[in-house]
Amino acid sequence: MTLPPVPLNIRTAKIWHCNYQTLAPVAELVNLETLVIATFPDNCLDFLSELTQLRFLSIMHFAAREQPGAAPGTREPAFLVAGHTSKLGR
């Protein structure tokens, strides 16, 4: 599923359990000040650094996905920030 087109001048967005493969296109919303995400599908938060006007960010849940090098069928939440992988505690 891809993100629908939205005006670039939008200042507030809520993305709620939408089954997107990635939220990277959100980085194009350069005027975004508030972003609320229910399920974050990406392994990396780096694209959010493009949102220089962002003042409030809320992420409820990081989606579990298979990690490179993990045993087949192993799914655990993890994310990548500035080149460092962190596993999230349950």
Image (cartoon, rainbow, N blue to C red):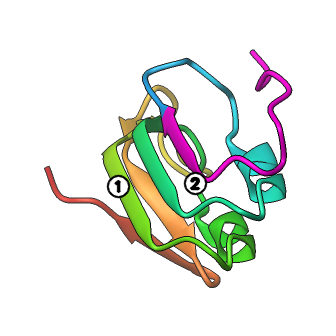
Q: Residue 55 at x, y = what percent? A: 46, 73
Badge 2, how many Cα within 10 Å: few under 14, some, many 20+? Answer: some
- Asked if the stretch drawn in magenta spans residue 11, the answer is yes
| Quadrant position of residue 88 | bottom left
Q: Residue 15 at x, y = what percent? A: 51, 32
Return the residue at label 2.
43
Q: Residue at x 55, y 38 (%)?
A: 41
Frontmost residue, 25 versus 56:
56
| Quadrant position of residue 32 | bottom right
Q: Residue at x 54, y 18 (%)?
A: 18
Name the chief secondary structure element in magenta.
Answer: loop
Return the residue at label 1.
58
CA separation in Å, label 2 and label 1: 16 Å
| Quadrant position of residue 25 | top right
Q: Is residue 12 above or below residue 38?
A: below
Name the residue type under label 2: Asn
Question: Start and end of the magenta stretch?
Answer: 1-14
Name the residue type under label 1: Ser
